[in-house]
Structure formats: C-alpha cells, structure tokens
Image (cartoon, helix red, strand yellow):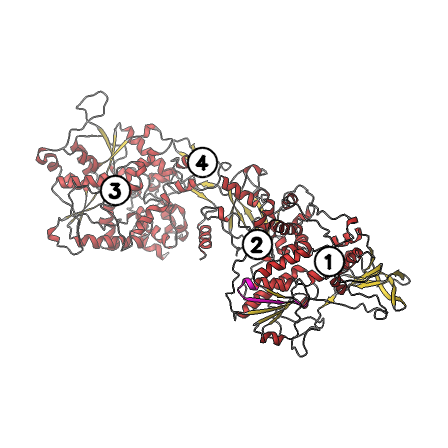
Amino acid sequence: MTQFQDIIKRTKAYLCLDCGKCTSVCPISILNENYTPRLLVNKVLRGDIDLLNDELLWSCISCGLCYERCESDVKFHEFIRDLRIEAYKIGKTGVYAHHGTMQSIMRMMTRPDLKQNRLDWLTKDLKVKIPKSEIRNPKSDSLTLYFVGCLPYFDSFFSNLQLNILQIAKSTIKILNHLGIEPVIMPNERCCGHDLLWTGDIENFKKLAQHNIAEINKTGAEKVLVSCPECYVTLKEYYPEYVAPLNAEIIHISELIAENLPELKNNGGTGFQPVKTHSQDGCANSSLKVTYQDPCRLGRFSNIYEQPRQIIDAMGFKLKEMDKNRKSAICCGTSGWMNCSTYSKQIQLARLKEAKNTGADLLITSCPKCQIHFKCAMSDKNIDKKTKIEIQDLTTLVANQLK
Amino acid sequence: MKKISHIQTALETKDIILKFPKITPITYTVRKINTSPCKDGCPIDTDVKAYLGLIATGKFEKALEIVKKDNPIPGICGRICVHPCETECTRDEIDQPLAICALKRFLADYELRHGSTPDLAGVKSTKKGKIAIIGSGPTGLTAANDLIRLGYKVTVFEELPVAGGMLYTGIPEYRLPRNIIKTEVNAIKELGVAIKTRTKIKSLSKLRKQGYDAIFIAVGAHKGLKLRVPGEDEFKGFLDCITFLRAVSLGKKVKIGKKVIVIGGGNAAIDSARTAFRLGSSVHIVYRRSRKEMPANAWEIEEAEREGIKIHYLASPLKILGENGKVVGMECIQNKLGKPDSSGRRRPVPIKGSEFNIETETIIPAISQEPDLSWLPAGHKLKISKWNSFEVDEDTLATNVKGIFAGGDCVTGPKTVIEAIAAGHKAAKSIDRYLQRKPLKEETKVNERVEFEVVIEPKEKKERVYMPHLSIKNRKNFKEVELGFKEKMAIEEAKRCLKCGFCAECSECMPDCEKSLVSLSIPEEPSGILLRVPLDQREFPLNGNPLQGKFSLAGGKKVTVIVEPITAQVRSELCRGCGDCEEICEYSAPKLQDQGNGVFISKIDEIGCKGCGICASVCPSGAITLNHFTNKYIETLIKHSTRL
C-alpha cells in the first residue's frame, strides 16, 4: 500500500528479519499474547490495510525497548506512531484514559485566543522573567527559557494522588536561581503536543508546535530548558521533524544540573545537605539507598543515562540499580493517556517490585509521567504493601538537598 | 427513590416486562414501537394505552387530558363509539378485550362529577379567517373545536333547535343522555365557537358575502331510504326511523301503535326498536340476513333481545297489509343465505312457500340513510355523487368549489361517530392549510408502518369488568341503560391492559427525569429511540431470556429486537483494578477479583447493577462501558431535547 510505503521506508521496517526479538522483550507482548510487534510489521509489509482498524495498534506503550533490541534498526515505536496517524485520519482512536480529558485539554490549547492562567503557581522567592508584551528586546532578557510543560495541569487534575508535582517546576527555578539564572517563563506557553502526536492527532500536534515555536523564538531565548523528558524529545526531535526547529538549544534539567555539579556543590560553600538515613540501626553515616527509573524519553530516546546517576551520586545517595536499567529499563507502563490497561498495571506492579527488591527506600525518576503512573498504581485498592515505595522526582530532590 | 417509584407507577412497568434475564435494573432501555393495536385501530389515533395506564394508576385528570387531545367529545364517544380499538385489542386472544370505550366514558363522567377547568390553551383569534360550518354533528363540532384552537373565528349553523346533529336526534336518550351532549357542546361553545341553532342555510353564496372565508358542510345523512315494497305509499302507519327518532328526541308527540315492526339490522334499527319499546309498544325487528351479518353492535342487539324485542332473522318484507288506508300487518318471507354479494356478506335468497304474516300498526323502516340535500339552492355547482352525497377529495375533503369543504356522513353515507370525528379533524387541517394559502395536500412523510408481535407470556386470565346495566323492569323510560364504571372498577379494568408496544407515550416520565434522559420521539428506524424505563426488581419473572419482540416491516422484512438491560460492562484488558468503581457504586455491583498475580480486575454483578453509569464515569482507563450509552444514542437524546 502506498500510504504505508513512506512509513516502511522512514522507519526501516523493510529491514525486518522476522526474528521476533522485539516481541520477546515487549512488556505488553509478555502479558498480552495477541500483541506482537513482529507480526504488526509483518502485516504492514504484506500490505494488510485492515491493520488500521486493529485495536492492537493502540496497545504499544512506545517505550522503545524493541528498537533497542532490533538487530535491523527498525524503529518500531515510530512505525506505530506513523500508523496511528494514518488510523486517526480514518477516525480510529485508542481508548483514552480519564475519559479523554487530557486529549481535550491538549486540543483546547490549539485555540489561538485561549487565555490561560498559567503562572499562578509562581511564588515570590522564585525569580523569573515574564515577557510582558510581544515585541521585546532580546538583549535585555535572560537567554534561558524554562518550558514548564503541563505540570500545572497535572497538579490539579491528579490532586487525589497527592503528587505535589508542581514542585518539579518550582525546584527547577530554584536550582536555576541557585546557579544565578533567572529564566524566562511564557504565560502563553502551550502543551508541547507529545501525547497528541503519539495518539495520532498530527494536525493538532502541528498547531501546538507552530504556536510554541513562534512564541519561543519571539522571546529570543538561546537555551530552552525543560524538566519533562517528553517535552524534551518533542522540542528537540519532533518539532524539527514535523514543523520546524527552534532557534535555541534544548536542555534537560538533568543535563544542566550534571554540568553544574561542581558549582552546585561548592556554591558559596553551601553545597548539598548530608543525606539523612531512614535506616533503623541509627547509624548516621550510612547512605540512603535509592534506585533510579530511566524514563524512556530521556534514556532510550535521548541517551541521557549517566547525568541523573552522577547527580544522585553527588548528593550522597547510594544508588542500587534495578536489574533492568539504562537501555534495558522497563517503562512505567503507559503513554499518551491512552490504553492504560490491565497490562499497564501489571508492568507497573512488576517494576515497583523490582525497585523494592533492590533494597532501596526511594525510587527516583526524572519524568513527571513516571511519577504519576507509579503513584496511581500504588494508590489502587488491594495493592500489595510489598510493592509500595516512596517516589521522588530527581529535580525536586536536588532542590530539597540544596543548602 | 421516591421519584423512581413514582415513575414506575406511572408506567405500570411491571406489566411491560415479558421476559427478563435478571432480577434488576431500575433503569433499562425499551425500544419503542410505533403503535399499539388499539391506537392503530382508532380512526383518530387516540393514545389509548396512555390513558389506560394513567387510569390504572388513578391519574384520571391526566388521562382525560390525553383523551381530549384527540377527542373533543369523550363523554359522547365513551357511550356510543363502536370502538374498533376493542376489536383490535390483544387481550382478546387471552380472554376479552379491554373495555376501552367504557373507560373513556368513565373519564368523562369523572370530569362531570368533579368539574373541570376548560382547557383554553391557544384559543385566541390569532389568525385571519372566518369559517362557517354547516351542521353541528360530531364532524362539525370537531372541526369547530380544532379550528377555533388554531385561532380562527368559527360559526356553526344548525337547522334544528338543538346542537349535536345525529347525536341528539338519532341516538336515543337511554344510550346518550342529553345533558352529556349539552355539556360537551357547551365546552366547545366556551372556546368561542358560535353555534346558531334554528338557522337553515339556503345559500352558500350568501354565506360568502357575509364574510366567511371557508365553508365546511357537515350536514350528515338524515334522509331515510325507502323500502320499495308494495303498499309502502298506500297505507298510513309508516314512520321512517330518522323521523321517528328525531321526533322522540325533540320531545314531540309521536303516535305509534301498540305493535311495531322495525325493518333493518343496523344500529338505527335497534335504536328505533328499543325506543318504541320504551314508548310502550311490543316490537318486532325484521332482518333479511342472520345475526352474524347484522351490522348493529352486538351488545345493542343483546340488550334489545333482553328487553323482549323479537328479532326475525332471515326474513324480508314482501308486501304491506292494510285495511281502511291503515297498516295492519306485513307479509314476510323466510330467506336462506346464498353466495356473498359485493359487500362480502352472504346474499339472502327467499325460500318459496315460507311466507308468514306479522300483525302491526306501525312500520319503521331503518334500512339506511342518505344525505338530505334539499336545502341546496338550485345551481349550486357542487358535485354530487349518485348516492346523493358530496364528492370531495379524499385527502383534503375539498369539494370542487374553492373554499367549500364537506365531510362526515354527508360524504360517506352513514358511518360511526368516531369516523365523523376523524373527518372533522381532517377538515380542520385542510381548511387551515387553505386559509394559510398552503397547498391543500400536505406532503407528509409516511412512516414505514411497523407492525409488531410481542411474544406474550401466558397471562393469567382475568375477566373483563362488566358494565352495570339498568334492570330490565326499569327500562320503560329513557333513563340511561349503561350505568358507567365506578373508580375502583375503572382501575381494575385498566390494569388488564397488556401494554402492547411497551411505551404508552403518556410522557409522565419526562418531567420526573432530572437529567432529561427520558424523551419520546417517533422513531424513524424500526428499532426506534430508546426509552429508559424504571422497573421494580421484585416483579421479575426469572426465566433467563431477554425481552424479545418480533417486528415485521411493511415489506415483510422481519426484524427481531431484543430489549436488554443497561448494565455496566468491564473490558477486562483495560481494567487496572484501581477499585474506584467498587468505591463509588451505591449498589455494590462491582467487585475486584484477584487474577492470581496480584492484579485485580473489576467484575460487575449484573444482578446488583442498576445501570446508572457512575462507575463508568469514574473509571480512569475507560474500561467500563454501558452498552446503550452509545454516542449515537446520546446524540439522539441531545438532538431531541434541544429540538435540533
């Protein structure tokens, strides 16, 4: 089929050797035997157009583990993403979680005249620059822009999970201020569009991208800092791929922190607080054991594995790696606010158990979505106490540990 | 909860249920079907089932409202209607049909006893146009009622001193008390209709000159047909049934003999005979076919016989016997039944040598009537048929002269009161279109007729509540013979209704539903719109099958419709086992079940589930669905409630 030809070419699906490694590692395939990445590729190569009607198209959690293992370099997650775009065009969608509220919010944000009260969470101690009017003199402003993302929305929507997820944004600014940076924050920022893209709604994704690109470029920022791995990969990879590149460098907060670790450690002689242990023997010097969850968008998608580990190490925590870490890390179970299923739950429970089995008292992640998904799973009724573990965002942790 | 039980009683839903898979849902969907047989059988499409259901629950005012929607003279109709609805009634297959007519009368009597406030809604002369109606019978009265409600000025002209036409002069008082006619005519007068009695119209063009924009002729069929038997014009003692009944009705002195023969087998014949009986005569009826072919109402024939009236079946008059210019008897001949004639009834064939004589002083022929057109001025230009009736367009009742319409018995020959009312409605619609300068023929979209047969559970037999009658010995007067239902009897009888076709369209449930989820509309597709109907879980037969109805379309296409309960369903692959559904459900229907690997999946107990949908609304992963809350269904509801 011609509409599949481009997809096959772009994602190198034609190189598929039918070896099945993708299926053998896919966290969904392990639980749902009906779903196999290998077969999906196979079907497309055979020109099976009916695939677009297949509900399994929406089961992929786009963790990229299959791509990681693929000998032939088939970008299966992108293959799925592009097929979803085709399926969406003929009216197919996945099963939206939370009744599609998130998708609705994202689509609402495509309205050019939308008025958001986006910066209400800012407190006085956080030093930021807010562009007042559209015509601005770039020179008079900071060259770093902080792209906050959907944190304020998540904070109110998931208030029942008691995530305090806005703390990530506050912590980011706190760290930046600590480093002497007053970031620009845009009151008219919009969702980056990551989830719309992955749910197949390419049109609205483009609208969001165009808006954000124009607004960011208007500020004249040279660096765009993000605290969300999804924003990171979207701004860095998908905007150039589907719309246009930004005139700025995209930096994830963990990159920035890692780069400035010496300065943070010795900033005016303050540095990090000594890590307080929760151990029962009362030995003051024993380090708190932590483990780290690699977010797919930061790890496999962006190759940022070591910076978070350096930061954890620098703060004095003892990092106990899970069996599956870095390139082999297991996803937090769901993506795109869609098809959050019983398989997602099982992946989450298994991963939480794995984290717990390291002997760590704290699970650190650097993606707000990982935190939401794990905390949601733990908030469920009948959850086994053995799988419960404290979860903390890396950025929040860094800000807390700063003296 | 109180609200729900209120709705439940309103619809008497427990009777709707034929089979049901489980003992519960308070709400579930019913696919509404076009019409029930009773409504289908009624020439004016009365919502019979609706008012029966409302009577059954004691809501008499509301029931009356529904009756009056289509019928401006329920008290009259409730007494003398030939009730084709009862002929169609499904209950007939089990025991006897519902006493629909008597129940309608009960409502009118109820209103009479309790007084009423006339419904004057919409009665304002808002439209330009004056209408003259000639004749104040049921057709004329109905048309007047409709047209004044449409906003026109209406004047009814009546030649006789009383309004009501055949109702007053043709139906005897013991069947239809005069105060009933007066009350219902007055109710129409109160709307603003002017009824000019003792006013004979002699010129239609004069009416036009008086400013009437449209004329509706509804003069009925008041001219008795002749016997065409030797001696008919020779002797004194002949009295045409129409003349006879009219004279008695108007309180004139009528001389009839001690012995009276009535010839004919229609209702007019029975009415004449029973009237003569009340005047003190001994009465014989001569009818040429057998009782089976007799067109009069069976219950009327029965009463006549009980009153001692002798009916000679299969007998025809041969000649009139007279002495000194007066009738003294009639020679008849016995018939047998031959092959069916054009009317479908078997033709009477005389048996040679079976002649016999009946002594009599008065002969009342009642062998049919035709319109009396003697009032029409010469050169009137109206097309008249060979049966002496007006020729009109069947759909619009328009005559060949612009602005003049005709309907009722004067077009069709003698018919029933309910058909007369139907003609009145038709005329009013047509005259409205004429005065609004719209094309007379309405382009109506004819809905595909949906016939249905519902698989009826064997119903317990329950005898019809019989109408109490005046005892025979008290009938030598014109007191009403049928005494009417008391409230208890009416409720008991109404409860026998099988409610064919599920929804009664009484719309009682609509104001109760806070979220306006209940709405009614005429379905375009045979499966129709869904109606949420509350149910009482204790009343379910537990025999494991969903409610199923077979529907056949006009083209013979069969559709099977299954009524399913709304219960929440979990797509287990999407369930995360969060337990939100379990927490929020008021009926403890969802339960988390361990899948053995620490993963829990919600299972919904269908018996406990009431289909409220609250679990679906909290489910974070969209795993719970309610099978009838499809987008299309919700869209239909929204469209309906916003009248888009």
What secondary structure is marked by label 1?
loop
Q: Nearer the viewer, mark 4 or mark 3?
A: 4
**At label 2, which amino acid type do we have?**
Asn
Q: Nearer the viewer, mark 2 or mark 3?
A: 2
Is residue B363 among what the camera can see?
yes
Question: Do the residues at pointers 1 and 3 share their chain?
Answer: no
Q: Is residue B409 above or below residue B79?
A: below
- How far is disc 2 from disc 3 in space, using C-alphas? 62 Å
**Label 3: chain?**
A
What secondary structure is marked by label 3?
loop
- How far is disc 4 from disc 3 in space, using C-alphas? 46 Å
- Label 4: how many residues lie within 10 Å, few (<14), some (14-19) or many (20+)? some
Most foreground residue, B616 or B314: B314
Which residue in the protein does label 2 denote? Answer: B34
Residue with the most extreme left position? A268
Which residue in the protein does label 3 denote? Answer: A300
Task: State the residue at coordinates (54%, 43%).
Answer: B8
**At label 4, which amino acid type do we have?**
Glu
Residue A97 in the image: state x and y as whole percent. 36, 43
Q: Which residues are magenta?
A: B147-159
- How far is disc 1 from disc 3 in space, using C-alphas? 98 Å
Residue B548 in the image: state x and y as whole percent. 58, 46
Which residue in the protein does label 4 denote? Answer: B586
- Label 3: how many residues lie within 10 Å, few (<14), some (14-19) or many (20+)? many
**At label 3, which amino acid type do we have?**
Arg
Question: Do the residues at pointers 1 and 2 share their chain?
Answer: yes
- Marks 1 and 3 close (CB-CB < 8 Å): no
